[in-house]
Amino acid sequence: MLHRMVSPTPAATPCVLLIEDDLALAELVARHLSDSGFAVSTAADAVEGWARLQAAQVDLVVLDIMLP
């Protein structure tokens, strides 16, 4: 069964946290997500990503699985 999370404020823009150490790839993915209507926050490593995740409401994390 597929479950969909419902935001408490339907008009709110979904926020994506992108954790990617390749700057060029991060910019490309962030631009695409932003053009698709998402608010995007980026982090270059897991430590920065964890801090951003704890500091703000995030709806989705896109994580580079090959982070050093």
Image: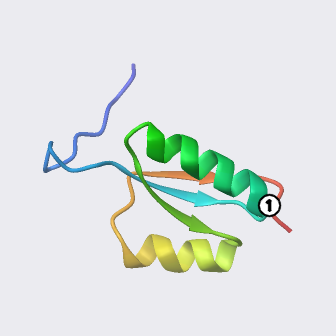
Query: Where's the C terminus, which quadrant?
Result: bottom right
Q: Is residue 20 above or below residue 32?
A: below
Say which quarter of the image contains residue 57: bottom left
Position above or below: 58 against 8: below
Kind of residue indicated by mark 1 = Asp
Q: Is residue 65 visible?
A: yes
- Position of 3 with respect to 8 (left or right) is right
Residue 64 seen by the camera: no
Residue 67 place in picture, x, y as percent: 81, 63
Residue plotted at (66% across, 55% down):
27
From the viewer's perspective, tell me whether residue 30 is left or right of residue 14: right
Point out residue 26 in the picture as x, y percentages from the top left corner: 68, 56
Residue 63 x/y as whole percent: 65, 54
Callout 1 secondary element: loop
Q: How is the image coloured?
A: rainbow
Q: Position of residue 35 (x, y in %)?
A: 46, 40
The residue sitting at 39% across, 79% down in the picture is 55
| Residue identified by numbered label 1 | 22
Q: Residue furthest top?
A: 1
